[in-house]
Image (cartoon, helix red, strand yellow):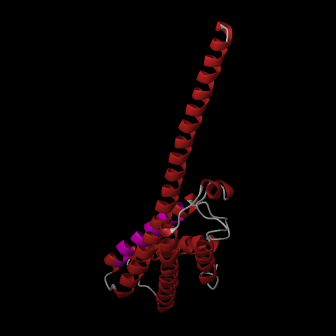
Amino acid sequence: MNEKAKKGFYVCGIIIALLIAGVVYQYGVVKKYETRIAADYRRSFSDVADYVGDIDYDITKALLISSPAAFTNMAEEIWRLSSLASEEIGKLPVSETELDNAEKYLAQAGEFMLSLARKTAKGEVISDEEREQLKQLGEYASNLNETLHAAETDIYTASFTRQELLDYGNSFLSASSAAIAENLSGVEESMADYPT
C-alpha cells in the first residue's frame, strides 16, 4: 500500500469516527429532549389534577361558610384555581375535544365564583338558586377530580417512546396508550352533562 492510499484510509477512518460520535451525541440530545417534554406534560397534567382537587375541596368549604367575607375570599380562590387549571390544560398536548368540556367547566366555574365573590363583597346574600348551582359545581368538580386522578396514575406509570412523542404532536399520549386515552375520554364524558 502506498503512502497516499494509507493517508486516504486514515482520513476516511477519522471521518467515519466523527460521524459516529456525532450520531451518538445527537441521540443523547434527543433522549434528553424527549425526557424533558414528557416530564413537562406530566407535570402540567398533575397540576391540572391538583388544581381541580383543590377546587373540589374549596367548593365544599364554600358551601359551609356563613361569613360573607370568608366566602368572598374562598370564591376568589376558586376563581384563581380555575384560571390556573385552564392555563395548564392549554399546555397539554391533547386534542381540543379531549378536555374541551373540562376547560369550559373551569372557565364557567371561575366566572360564577367571581360573580359570587363580587356579590358577597357588596354585602349581598347568596340566593338559594346560586347555592344550588354551587352544589352542582361541586359535584362536577368531584367527578372531574376522580377522573383526572385516575388518568394521572396511568400517565405516571406509562413509558413513552420517541416515536409516540412525535406521532402525537410531541405528546406523551398515543394510540398505544389506550388507558390514558380512555381516561381522557372519560373526563370528556363526565363533563358532557355540564351545562355550557
Residue drawn at x 43%, y 72% is 78
Depicted 85 relative to depicted 129: above or below: above
Image position, residue 7 (x, y; %) = 63, 12
Residue drawn at x 64%, y 71% is 98
Q: What is the count of numbered marks?
A: 0
User: Is 105 in front, or is 179?
Assistant: 179
Magenta residues? 71-87
Residue 82 seen in render: yes
Q: Residue furthest top?
A: 3
User: Is 114 in front, or is 153?
Assistant: 153
Q: Quadrant of the N terminus?
A: top right
Image position, residue 73 (x, y; %) = 35, 72
**Dominant secondary structure (helix, strand or loop) of the stretch shown in magenta:** helix
User: Is 75 in front, or is 98?
Assistant: 98
Image position, residue 12 (x, y; %) = 65, 21
Depicted 70 relative to depicted 169: above or below: below
Image position, residue 170 (x, y; %) = 62, 54
Residue 194 in the magenta stretch? The answer is no
User: Is 93 in front, or is 61?
Assistant: 93
Residue 83 in the magenta stretch? The answer is yes
The answer to which quarter of the image holds residue 59 is: bottom left
Depicted 4 relative to depicted 50: above or below: above
Residue 195 seen in render: no
Q: Residue furthest front?
A: 1
Relative horizontal placement of residue 166, taking residue 127 as reference (left or right) = right
Q: Quadrant of the C terminus?
A: bottom right
